[in-house]
Image (tube, rainbow, N blue to C red):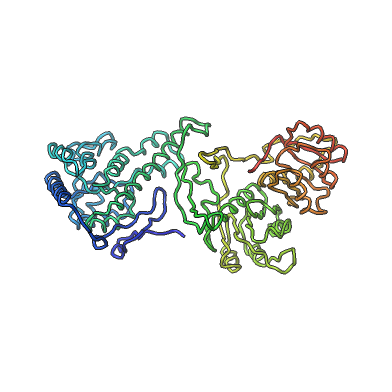
Amino acid sequence: MPLHLLSSPATAAKLAPGLRATPLRRGHSFVPAPHRSGDRVSVASSLSAAASAMAAAETKEGVSGKKQVLISLSDKTDLAYLGNGLQSLGYSIISTGGTATSLESAGVNVTKVEEITNFPEMLDGRVKTLHPSIHGGILARRDQEHHLKALKEHGIGTFDVVVVNLYPFYDKVTSGAISFEDGIENIDIGGPTMIRAAAKNHKDVLVVVDHNDYPALLEYLKGNQEDQQFRKMLAWKAFQHVASYDSAVSEWLWKQSHKGDAFPPSFTVPLELRSTLRYGENPHQKAVFYADKSLSLVSAGGIATAVQHHGKEMSYNNYLDADAAWNCVSEFDSPTCVVVKHTNPCGVASRQDVLEAYRLAVRADPVSAFGGIVAFNTTIDEDLAKEIREFRSPVDGETRMFYEIVVAPGYTEKSLQILKGKSKTLRILESKRSGKGMLSLRQVNGGWLVQESDDVTPEDITFTTKSERAPQENELSDAKFAWLCAKHVKSNAIVIAKNNCMLGMGSGQPNRRESLRIAFRKAGEEAKGAALASDAFFPFAWNDAVEEACQNGIGIIAQPGGSMRDDDTVDCCNKYGVSLVVTGVRHFRH
């Protein structure tokens, strides 16, 4: 369940020592609240250390003469609250451009940066803070006498706090059409430089990049400011903020300069923590869920951005299964229902009447469907919701079907009420259709495998007849449907289908013949005259999977081809009068 940092001024007084969490947005993370002086007991300190600290403080006072904060913000949320809070604590505020104007409007006394640098803002705002009077005051180490001496010689004051966030580059380049020149102008230079400088010198300078951390900052400044852990956490957050920003710039520039090349020599994947999960694939494994904030995934849809309307919090396995179900059902244009168990579609059906599609999808394998995920590519209305709530298992005709998750692109208000009444735990997800042309990443020990997503559909390829008997139009349609289903089944994958309905499937077996037998066992007598699709070629035909399929009365076989024994497969199909079509496209799924 997401944690939330108390972020409003009204809650600041209620803050207690311990962990606080910011709302988890791009670049945001948890920052623990500082320990107040009353929470800690100083056991011992050396006289020499105390003397050194006093000397440093005297030197610092001689350099700056006052406590100073530098503020430069694009996102000015809670700026007035921060400015007034800092001013009440005796801090002098140095600020830039629009930030200074906003602070003055809120009644906060501000010194503008150009009054410190004695140099005007120039180059259309590109140069404002890139000056020794700013960066010297940020980077100087307070425990290094020669640093402080240098500042004093040049009349540079120190900064105790730096509050900066960056130009909204991410939002700009993802908001629609934007020129290359406009994109370049939205790359922040001065901001990241100040953030990095302050984060590096975090022992002496507090750096804040998130307005949700303002209450924690003010509380810290009221204390003795000895908690180095708080400073370190803010510094980490600052570097992460800049790293996320730079990854967006890098991704955008690569696409601008290498159009059509999806694989740069190096790249960064910006991940945002969304939730802490109860556990991982198994209870003894800890797990969390991150959202991918890559520019390429903006508006891409999918389960990661789904809205949960009801039910228990999502688990690790829930995400995997829901993703598999949603990716599969999103492939179909006509009204379709997909039922998934352990990431494999165990039931798929397309009908103009989506209620019928739902019933057929469940009947394909009702045992597996129980406790599975049911997905639709159409809005769920009142009638469909009632059917989902009341439908009895085809196994005994009495037991109501139980599901972990229902996912669809939309719901009517009435349908949500009905589904919420089915179970307190039923997770109801609303998701946008999954996008195409994405990169698929998968981890192996010590590295990552990256590939283009498998977006090929039956419309993209040619089903070439290799047998003597050409398939009838309905047989070819069945073959295409089975082939599209097989794409989402774990290898070795066999799917038997007829009339746009999966009858049986075999998945994940080390040999293709065993997958075939599982599929026929599920399909039963309905397999006669149906279509069979294989995700990869058949290495053997005679006295093997192909002949066994023919002997079981299959009407048409669709497979990629490419085996050195393809001619045997053709001869076998001709012997039994079965149509054979070759796709030339393999659909392994590991």
Q: Is residue 582 above or below residue 76?
A: above
Q: Give the image quarter of residue 359.
A: bottom right
Quadrant the C terminus occupies: top right
- Which one is nearer the viewer's eye here, 287 or 126? 287
Q: Give the image quarter of residue 121.
A: top left
Q: Left or right: where does residue 377 sit relative to residue 572?
A: left
Instruction: Let me know if residue 305 appears in the view.
Output: yes
Q: Position of residue 22 (x, y in %)?
A: 38, 55
- Give the mark count: 0
- Which one is nearer the viewer's eye here, 177 or 237? 237
- Which one is nearer the viewer's eye here, 390 or 553? 553
Q: Residue at the location (47% across, 56% down)? A: 276
Instruction: Let me know if residue 479 appears in the view.
Output: no
Q: Left or right: where does residue 286 sit relative to residue 357?
A: left
Q: Position of residue 223 (x, y in %)?
A: 23, 58
Q: Position of residue 528 (x, y in %)?
A: 83, 49
Q: Left or right: where does residue 226 sit relative to residue 370?
A: left
Q: Residue at the location (30% across, 43% down)? A: 195
Q: Left or right: where does residue 362 sit relative to residue 82?
A: right
Q: Is residue 13 above or below residue 112?
A: below
Q: Position of residue 472 (x, y in %)?
A: 82, 42
Q: Residue at the location (53% across, 41% down)? A: 445
